Amino acid sequence: MNKQNRPARLKAALLALALALVLVTLLWRELREQRPAAERTASPAPTGQALIERGAYLARAGNCMACHTERGGAPYAGGRGIATPFGTVYAGNLTPDASTGIGAWSAEDFWQALREGRSRDGRLLYPAFPYANYSRLQREDADAIYAFLRSLPPVARANTPHELRWPFNTQLALAAWRTLYFKPEPFEPQAQQSPAYNRGAYLVQGLGHCSACHAARNVLGASNPLDLAGGLIPMQNWYAPSLTDARQAGLMDWPLADIVALMQTGVSPRGSVQGPMAEVVLHSTQHLSQTDLQAMATYLKALPASPRPPPPARLAQANTAGAALYDKHCVQCHGAQGQGVSNAYPALAGNRAVTMDSTVNLVQMVLHGGYPPATAGNPRPYGMPPYWVDLSEQDIADLLNHLRSSWGHSAGAVSAVDVQAARSRR
Amino acid sequence: MLNSLRLILFAALLSPLLAAAQSTAPAPFEDSMAQRSMACTHCHGVQGRAGPDGYYPRIAGKPAGYLYNQLLNFKEGRRHYGAMTQLLDPLSERYLLEIAQHFAALQAPYPPPLATRASPALLERGRQLALQGDAARQLPACTQCHGQRLTGVLPQVPGLLGLPRDYLNAQLGAWRNGKRRAHAPDCMASIAKGLAEQDIEAISSYLAAQPIPADSRPQNARAAQPALAANTAAQECGGTAVAAGVR
């Protein structure tokens, strides 16, 4: 029997060897490209006040500061931990300090980091830094951001070492990940589309790195920079709704002006932003020019719709416990007909955030409350209280089932177990 | 006749129900800071008078500078409470200042203190530390910075009365182990680090048991100045804090 199997085993062994060789070659290619900084051609760095200002604007568009600033720390000096399923990645110091920041970096080094996800010394960077998006940047924009960062006061703050589990803490694992999921891809404008569409696509796919939240990640944390079909934000317990589904956050039916208003002020006649998106509006999109916001809105509105998912297996049922909780806690602001108060409290009737399949954001809102962002366009927002003190998981399930079956809604049922899951996945 | 009697009886029976229905009807929406800050008062009590479970502190009538600094401290990681941080993250500094000023301006009456279960010896120890300090251990009295009446000093030293014992214990503990911090110079941290656990228990028990003086408003800094003069370190600290002021 063994003798009969020998040729088959030999074949399998040869195949395994061939696969291993291919893999080693690919990994070697990834790791081999670690060139010392001196080998790269040092082109003179462009400078000038106009360039710095453009860089500051683009850094806003990329919301670089949100990750590269520790809570209460110096702007851009790094140190904020980004929790991932593989451990915590700490953002680096981007101020021009010579030893701890990017003081010794050339414009070329900076461009390499954005486009290829490699540090100045050739080390592979973790994709929590969304270089799959940033590889779409144009060189002039990278240079402008570089000039802006070089204009900041240098802050001596040594980078915090990442706290990742084995094997994710090895360069070999990163090389393997990149072999599978990453290739620098420059932005390709579509000739048949308008300049506004292409500008919007450039911002959304590139600097805006919208897909970092609005796309699902696979088990190894990879997502497609062109995908905006929605995804659970790892470790944050918020669901970034699909921008290609009209029943979630798809904008195909929205007037352009409402999309712009939402990104500019955080509120619009059709809904307001909460949670992680509130911070994106606060720190990034509210500062963008009308032209760029309209461009982004044009692109987002034109995204092709993804296929409709199957209807929920079990529908939410009206229930007296949920109705009583609504009358006690919610009716004062959201109204007996779920109509809300214009410019203050969102309507719940017909609100996609209420009827969407994923209920994690609803649970977050009920548990923790929240304010829309205090923006120049909406400087004094109205807030919702946290209810984790008052409501049990069963109460929240009852309440959400009430919301999801009232006012003509027919959305999926929520159980106390769902609420617990949404609550504990932090 | 009988019918009208019945009607009157019916109306009489119904009227309490109608009144009840009226009192539970939702308050009409108003374009006000009270309306905007319902996210705060849900835990901190109506008008910010104090929360339901003895842990959410009173915020009404505290100095605006103090409240504003606390909001920044939560936002910038010098105080740690997830529920607060999550609420404040999307708000601008300008709006946080307005929220602080709103609650500072509320002069809501205080409830009487809860009956204390602390021993007379513990309360006496607390009284000594709060009113006299402990010169041998370089511990200033609470009154040196928080005002002779312990109702706070404008613009940013909070009052210490009308707060639950659990809250005071937790805060002094947090100052002591570095979990709660303030802008430099962080004098409260250095004082708390000099306190033993029994000191904290004594001070918290004493403060929580004190009745509120008729004038519960924070003193202004000028009036409190002679008290500060007795202790050079405290004066320097208080002076710098005042200068640091509202950003």
Image (cartoon, coloured by chain):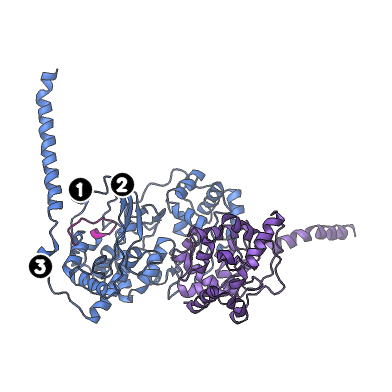
Q: Colour of chain B?
A: purple
Residues at marks 1 and 2 on the same chain: yes
Q: Position of residue B43 (x, y in %)?
A: 58, 61
For residue A161, the mark is none
Q: Would you name the residue on which mark 3 appears? A: A41
Disc 2 residue type (three-letter): Arg
The N terminus of chain B - image quarter = bottom right
Q: Chain of mark 2?
A: A
The furthest residue to the top: A1
Q: Is residue A127 magenta?
A: yes
Q: Which residues are magenta?
A: A120-132
Looking at the rendered structure, the secondary structure element under dot 1 is helix
Q: Chain of mark 3?
A: A
Q: Chain of mark 1?
A: A
Residues at marks 1 and 3 on the same chain: yes
Disc 1 residue type (three-letter): Leu
**Distance between mark 1 and mark 2 Cα atoms:** 13 Å
Q: Is residue A275 magenta?
A: no
| Left or right side of B22 for A215 | left
Q: Would you name the residue on which mark 2 appears? A: A165
Looking at the rendered structure, the secondary structure element under dot 3 is loop
Q: Position of residue B42 (x, y in %)?
A: 59, 62
**Distance between mark 1 and mark 3 Cα atoms:** 27 Å
Q: Would you name the residue on which mark 1 appears? A: A172
Q: Is residue B155 above or below residue B2?
A: below
Q: Nearer the viewer, residue A342 or A280?
A: A280
Q: Quadrant of residue A14?
A: top left
Q: Is residue A246 above or below residue A53?
A: above
Q: Quadrant of residue A52?
A: bottom left
